[in-house]
Structures are given as structure tokens and as C-alpha cells.
Image: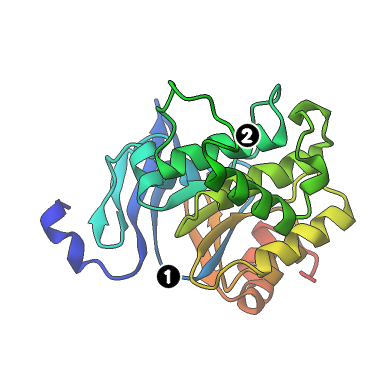
Amino acid sequence: MDLGNATSVGGFLNIDKIGKSFGGLKILTDVSFSVSKGERIGIIGPNGAGKTTLFNMIAGEFPPTNGDIYYEGENITKLPNYKRVRKGMARTFQKNNLLNDLTVLDNLLLVLQKKVGLEKVWYKPRTNKRFPGIYDEADRLLETWQLQERRDTVINRLSYGEQRQIEILLGIATEPRVLLLDEPTAGMSNAETSYILNLLNDLPKDLTLLIIEHDMDVLFSLSDRIIVLHNGVVLAEGTPDQIKNDPRVTEVYFGKEEVV
């Protein structure tokens, strides 16, 4: 489809018959779905179903082999990832993607500098006196996420669960309109998981979330709708209750046992 037809595609975010192959290996073949603004979408499927590959294409890490992606009526299929970030798309990764030798504050300030266009101001040392706005914003975010005590801690001295929290915080700091969360509670304790779940539930209702998560309790509580991937296509799509009671999902994804 060309850009001239983009506005004819309904929905806030539209995935239109996309597929991805690496050489002769087909990961996804024909995946289509639409997402409304502010909707929370869970993505599940067996290992190797292509969940992270789907995220990588939506975020612009690499292009699909076939199909198109539309965002706010624009065909962004060939748009590089940094331009998608500028348009309000952000993501987290399965494995933490942090600057481990810098402090929590420095990681956050780098994101905020980019957001306000100060990333190329190399001739002025970054200090609170020169750029008080980004420091104030960083402290506000750290306080909201109850991470103020970790402000000056080097990332590699944090627990894995705390690093996951910082990863999510950096995504939120860009003030996205779409946030892709790839296993946001992976490696967290029950207490950390509950904490993150509460914070995600408190995010602005107009923020669109796409979530890959293996903790079904977390996914079902966060999602308005769940999409199940299997063998490169969408196997099922529906509300959490519909997915729980779908015999195809029970057999393919959860095994023969009843979903609880």
C-alpha cells in the first residue's frame, strides 16, 4: 500500500498482513490487527511464536518482509526507529538496555536531554544550574516511581528487578503515545511485580500499551484485549475472559490444563 492510501486504514495503530523471514526461516507470515488509542493489548504465544519479532518490526528495529504498518494514519513501514520515537513510540527490551556504568540519574537525564533537544549541546556542561528543568523532571519521575533513593546508584549495582524498573521508567520518560513492553516483570520478585503492575495500571488512560508477558496474571490484569500468535499467524484474539475460555489457546499455548 502506498502513503496515499494510508488514511483509509482505520485505527490508531494498524498491523496489515505483515510477515518476517530470515533467509528461509519464516517467523511471521500474515499478521493483522488494529489497536485503538489508549487500548492495552497483550501479546502471547508459545516460545518462538514471533512475539519479539513483531515488536521489533513495530518499533522499527528492522522492516517486515511483507505487509505494512500504519500509525495515526501514516504508513511507517520503512520509517527508521529513531523517527518513530519522535512520533511518540517507545519500547523496552527483553534484556535490559541500560548504560550500566552510569548512575540511575545519568541514564534518565540522557533520555530527558534527547526529549527536549539538548543532546547536542556539548559546549555547556550539563548541570542543575544550567538546565534545571530536566533535573526537576528527573527527580519528579524518580519520586513517582519510588526510586529516589537509587538516584545516584550506578546501574550495575542494582538488582535485576530494579534494573527492569529503570528500563520501564526510561520508556515512560519520553512521554510516548505508544509504549511496547517486552516482558516488563521478567526476573522480578512478587513484591516488585505487584509494584510495577500498580504503576502500569496508573499510567495515563490515553497511553496505548502493547505488552509481551509470560506472567498470565499480570497480562490478564493489564490487558483490554489479547492477541495469541501461533505458527506465524494470529491464532485467537479477544478479551482476557474469551482467551481463557478458548479451547484452541488452552491446547496450543497453555497445554491441556484449564487456564486460571
Task: Look at label 1 and name its amino acid.
Answer: Lys
Which corner quadrant holds the C terminus?
Answer: bottom right
In which image quadrant can residue 79 be found?
Answer: top left
Circle 2 residue = 107
Residue 219 percent coordinates (x, y): 68, 63
> In the rendered view, does 175 fall on the left or right side of 73?
right
Circle 1 residue = 37
For image coordinates 54% across by 55% down, the residue present is 229
Depicted 149 relative to depicted 123: above or below: below
* Nearer to us: label 2 or label 1: 2
In which image quadrant can residue 140 be found?
Answer: bottom right
Residue 109 percent coordinates (x, y): 58, 37
Element carrying mark 1? loop
| Residue 162 numbered mark, or none | none
Circle 2/circle 1 CB separation < 8 Å: no
For image coordinates 53% across by 47% down, the residue present is 133
Q: Nearer the viewer, residue 98 or 15?
A: 98
Depicted 183 relative to depicted 72: above or below: above
Badge 1: few (under 14), some or many (20 or more) residues near its Cα, within 10 Å? some
